[in-house]
Amino acid sequence: MLREDLLVFLATVFHIINVGLVIIGLQVIFIGVVPDMYIAVLSTVYWIPILVFSPLWGYLADATGQYKKVMTSTLVLFAAITYMHAVFTDYVSILILRFLSGLFSAAYTPIMQAYMTLDIEYRVFGKKIATYNTAVAVGFLSSGYLTSIVLFYVSPVSIFYFAALSTMVSAFMVSLLPRKHGHRRIVNVGEAISSLFSPRAVKILRKRRAHFLVFGLAVRHIAIMGMFSLIYVYMQRRGIPEYLLGILSSFNNIMQVLLIPIFGVLVDRIGRKKVFVPGFVLSSMIPLFFINAITPLDFAIAFSFIGIGYALLISGANPYLRDAAPRGEESEILSLANTTRAFGMIFGPIIVGTLVAFFSYEAMFYILFVIGILASLMAMVSQEQYGYRQIRAL
């Protein structure tokens, strides 16, 4: 079990390094080359296929039981497409490559979380998934520092070489995992089609109002993911040097690395909702920290609060979704963590880009605050799947 956890951790770290490198790299490469709104659209294009296909990948992995094969093959294709970013560097080509990247990276998150929680008890879901969530935080933390090093010493385009290599390492780690089959069944074309865009998964979650958490996550991600689509552009316009972008944003991930393991244990003791609701509330306040941020210290503090809010939210939300997942549909239900994030990244950058183009960054931050409050209210309506006494008794 320790070997499996270590492989999952490392595979996830190297997978996320790709995502983190490219997020910052594209904003640095295209600032001043295309309008800011066009830069935001690169995020939107990446997340559209994740919204559509993440639940389908989850359904296919659940139905066939081929968790390792699906993850390994999609990671290899993701690495190849990432490498092509360094070859075809014009905006239109990158736009197409971002779509293809999203198509194959959509498989990893739901399938890996389902894989690592197969055949274990509910009472340790929080601790188990915390391993994955901590790895995500470490991956983004590593990518932040690696981005700063690359931008300081070599060309920004070199970021894509490092990103492609990290994904190949991730694929290798996945290939070393023990084989698990889960609850296999015959693939049904109708079910596969209905899994697209997640309506089937959301319908399953209507019991005990679990679907309200999904709605809250989608709205929350509009605010936070939308903000991230231009936050590095905003920082540069506020006078922050490009080589400090990764270092300052890493404070977000430092807080996650420190707190997710703690909150992962906590949710198994007191329940999921008591942890993710405060995460929603704190996340709603994040845009306010950036309005008057000027110095590197100001931005470091703002990113730290992002990390605290997200650690609370993700530590409770992911085990909550796993609790609600029927046997044999774990990956598909967990894909909602991906699709809600995709929903935010599709519509968030559009909203943010429009607000910045027609109003100002300040107006954008205030509106994102209001959106965050709305998301918090939705999360509060959800009903706990298991109380802490039930979890401890399972």
Image (spheres, rainbow, N blue to C red):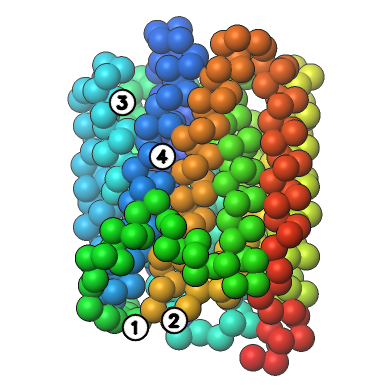
Marks 3 and 1, how far apart in space?
A: 38 Å
Answer yes or no: do the residues labelled 1 and 2 have beta carbons within 8 Å?
yes
Q: Counting other residues with Cα less than 10 Å from the Cα at mark 4, is it few (<14), some (14-19), or many (20 or more)?
A: many
| First of labels 3, 1 by sequence position | 3
| First of labels 1, 2 by sequence position | 1
Q: In the rendered image, which residue does mark 4 sit on?
A: 47
Q: Counting other residues with Cα less than 10 Å from the Cα at mark 1, is it few (<14), some (14-19), or many (20 or more)?
A: some
Give the quadrant of residue 164: top left
Answer yes or no: do the residues labelled 2 and 4 have beta carbons within 8 Å?
no
Q: Quadrant of the C terminus?
A: bottom right
Q: Nearer the viewer, residue 249 or 327?
A: 327
Marks 4 and 1, how far apart in space?
A: 29 Å
Marks 4 and 3, how far apart in space?
A: 12 Å
User: Closer to the observer: label 3 or label 2?
Assistant: 2
Give the total number of marks visible in the rendering: 4
Q: In the rendered image, which residue does mark 3 sit on?
A: 95
| First of labels 4, 1 by sequence position | 4
Q: Horizontal and vertical percent for residue 375?
A: 69, 46
Q: Which mark is residue 183?
A: 1
Q: In the rendered image, which residue does mark 2 sit on?
A: 327
Q: For numbered disc 1, what is the local secondary structure?
A: loop
Q: For numbered disc 2, what is the local secondary structure?
A: loop
Q: Horizontal and vertical percent for residue 196?
A: 35, 54
Is residue 229 among the parts visible in the rendering?
no
Is residue 207 among the parts visible in the rendering?
yes
Q: Residue, x 27% and y 32% (percent of image)? A: 97
Left or right, 352 with reference to 333: right
